[in-house]
Image (cartoon, helix red, strand yellow):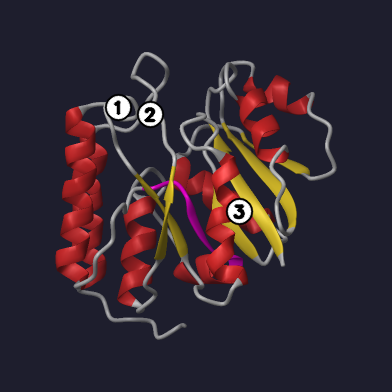
């Protein structure tokens, strides 16, 4: 198996070098590539990425900012792996957890794996952020009669071809809900494993807002009423 780690980046000059180093320093049980999409950054992100030299890295540039969903769509187009996982460049997630996501796949227990965050006072962005995440996740559980623990997790691991077949159209953070809605609608139940997490503050560059939560609820409802594509 070959794993494609997809990293969308937007104005992360302070963190992107560390994020890339952390991702490459992990001892993965599979062959790995890192596909980075600079989504129209206006700071020194592109310059920093151009200075990285590792045969596992592939960098793609967006001339203007299009959103996380669009960046992942571009990354998937350039991915050459069998499986993919999304890893943001904001250092909120620990790439050392990625091998844990791979275990149930390599053992034949799962096809889709989500990293389930445990929120605590030292790791959560705010009370309302956690409640918003729980509200969106609860809505998905009710709409699709399942029991997910963390819909908005960045760590979503699945076959590259499966992601391509979902035809995700959401350009921004709504892609998280669209991916999950389409997976559940087509009877792909994610296998969840616990992961570590440390949210950054708004001052540190946190970008998601309550409007993204409202959009996620709309997308989940929209996908629920559509017919399954029967692609398994």
Residue 157 belongs to magenta span: yes
Residue that badge 3 annotates: 99
State the mark number for residue 205: none
Residue that badge 2 annotates: 199
Badge 3 or badge 2: first in the primary sequence: 3
Q: Secondary structure at mark 1?
A: loop
Query: Can residue 7 be seen?
Result: no
Q: Are marks 2 and 1 in contact (CB under 8 Å)?
A: yes
Report x, y in % for residue 182: 35, 68
Report x, y in % for residue 74: 59, 50
Badge 3 or badge 1: first in the primary sequence: 3
Distance between the Cα atoms at labels 3 and 2?
21 Å
The mark closer to the camera, 3 or 2, is: 3
Magenta segment, which residues? 153-160
Q: Residue at x 55, y 55 (%)?
A: 100
Figure disc tally: 3
Q: Residue at x 45, y 68 (%)?
A: 166
The residue closer to the viewer here, 63 or 209, is 209
Residue 180 belongs to magenta span: no
Q: Residue at x 69, y 45 (%)?
A: 34
Residue that badge 1 annotates: 125
Quadrant the N terminus occupies: bottom right
The local crowd at label 1, few if under 14, some if 14 to 19, many if 20 or more residues have their Cα within 10 Å, is some
The quarter holding residue 118 reads top left
Report x, y in % for residue 148: 28, 61
Report x, y in % for residue 41: 56, 25
Tell me: residue 99, above or below residue 68.
below
The quarter holding residue 159 reads bottom right
């Amino acid at each position: 198996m070959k794993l494609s780690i997809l990293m969308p980046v937007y104005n992360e000059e302070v963190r992107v070098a560390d994020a890339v180093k952390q991702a490459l320093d992990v001892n993965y049980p599979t062959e790995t590539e890192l596909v980075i999409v600079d989504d129209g950054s206006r700071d020194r992100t592109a310059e920093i990425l151009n200075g990285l030299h590792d045969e596992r890295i592939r960098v793609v540039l967006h001339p203007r900012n299009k959103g996380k969903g669009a960046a992942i769509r571009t990354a998937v187009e350039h991915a050459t792996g069998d499986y993919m996982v999304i890893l943001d460049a904001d250092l909120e997630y620990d790439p050392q957890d990625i091998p844990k996501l791979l275990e149930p796949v390599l053992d034949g227990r799962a096809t889709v794996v989500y990293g389930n965050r445990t929120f605590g006072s030292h790791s959560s962005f705010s009370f309302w952020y956690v409640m918003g995440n729980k509200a969106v996740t609860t809505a998905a559980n009710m709409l699709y009669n399942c029991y997910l623990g963390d819909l908005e997790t960045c760590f979503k691991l699945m076959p590259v071809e499966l992601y391509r077949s979902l035809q995700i159209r959401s350009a921004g953070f709504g892609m998280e809900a669209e991916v999950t809605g389409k997976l559940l609608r087509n009877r792909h139940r994610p296998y969840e494993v616990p992961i570590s997490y440390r949210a950054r503050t708004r001052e540190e560059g946190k970008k998601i807002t309550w409007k993204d939560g409202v959009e996620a609820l709309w997308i989940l409802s929209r996908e629920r009423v559509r017919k399954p594509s029967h692609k398994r």
